[in-house]
Amino acid sequence: LGDWLDERTGHRAFLAHMLDEPVRGGARWAYVWGSALVLTFVIQAVTGYLLMSAYAPSATTARSSVAHVSFTMRAGWIVRGLHHFGAQAMVILLVLHLGQTALAGAYKRPREMNWFLGLALLAVTLGFALTGYLLPWDQKGYWATRVATNIVGSVPAIGPWLQSVLVGGSEYGHATLTRFYSLHVGVLPALLVALLVAHDALFRKHGVTPPAKVDEPGAPPAKVDPFYPKQVAMDLAFGLVVLGVLFAIAMREHGAPLDAPADPASDYPARPEWYFLALFEILKYLPGSLEVLGAVG
């Protein structure tokens, strides 16, 4: 059967190309971050598509549909919890991955473009977070999004136009929600996949950045392991740890939090997720005309 399939698809050569990639310096736990990020994105995609099946993207139905998922639908709370905490895990893993890349010197020639693609992937991930926490249409998401879009509005020259495009006019409502939903489930996933393919292609072109001692003058020939099986096993083991931690947190918190319905007339203290808190804090100390320096800069 394998011979029959290979004659028609050439799958063995494809698998060999994927799994026989040489790893200079040998398999290492330091190389697991990229694979863990891909796994986390897969978790986000699967749980996101499941949530889409029950989500009603309008200002009058969004919050009630999220409440239905969280409190009524069987296993809905665990799916939403995995999605919520998986988003935070992606931010943490990306920062750790970029930090490890910087320490290993993998941003240097000839890998500069891959470093820039990594930064672009970080920006897209933060874009997912920004567009995602409005979707429950609760107080926290609504008011945090108002602050974020006001920051966009402070961009010189094109800020008011950009804010109007994001908000869908001058008032926050149904058009705002549907635009953020379209970005979250349509535009940003396509952009992330495109960047991820380019990132992986350049990674395969230049290979893993070996430890510095491998290229030192007089060093013995570097150990070279194929990607499979040792590095694959390490990647899978770390991926299972990440998945287990996400399940444990979602179980402990019994899903993701859900605030009261969005109320434009209320006086709610806007608080975003922790990874945007520094940006909000800066705005306290740079008011008025200086806001653009702290927020946009």
Image: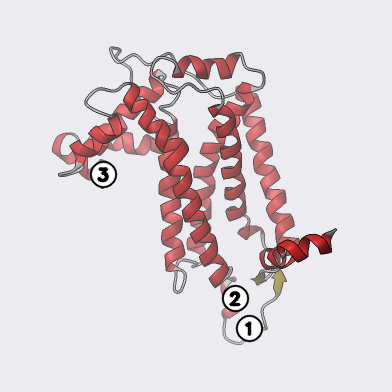
Asked if residue 186 shows in the view, the reply is yes
Q: Nearer the viewer, residue 202 or 140?
A: 202
Looking at the rendered structure, the kind of residue marked 3 is Val
Do the residues under discs 2 and 1 have CB atoms within 8 angstroms? Answer: yes
The residue depicted at 71 percent of the width and 70 percent of the height is 225
Instruction: Give the mark count.
Output: 3
The residue depicted at 66 percent of the width and 58 percent of the height is 29
- The percent coordinates of residue 277 (x first, y second) are 38, 35
Q: Give the image quarter of residue 292.
A: top left
- The percent coordinates of residue 273 (x first, y second) are 43, 32
Q: Nearer the viewer, residue 212 or 74?
A: 74
- The percent coordinates of residue 155 (x first, y second) are 21, 42
Mark 3 vs mark 2, CA separation in Å? 40 Å
Within 10 Å of the Cα at label 1, are there few (<14), some (14-19), or many (20+) other Cα atoms?
few
Q: Nearer the viewer, residue 187 or 203?
A: 187
Q: Which residue is mark 3?
A: 296
Q: Which residue is mark 1?
A: 219
Looking at the rendered structure, the kind of residue marked 1 is Ala
The tag on residue 213 is 2
* Foreground tag (3 vs 2): 3
Q: Nearer the viewer, residue 84 or 210?
A: 84
The residue depicted at 49 percent of the width and 43 percent of the height is 91
Q: Secondary structure at mark 1?
A: loop
Of pointers 3 and 1, the one earlier in the residue sequence: 1
Asked if residue 271 shows in the view, the reply is no
**Image vertical order of residue 245 relative to residue 74, above or below:** below
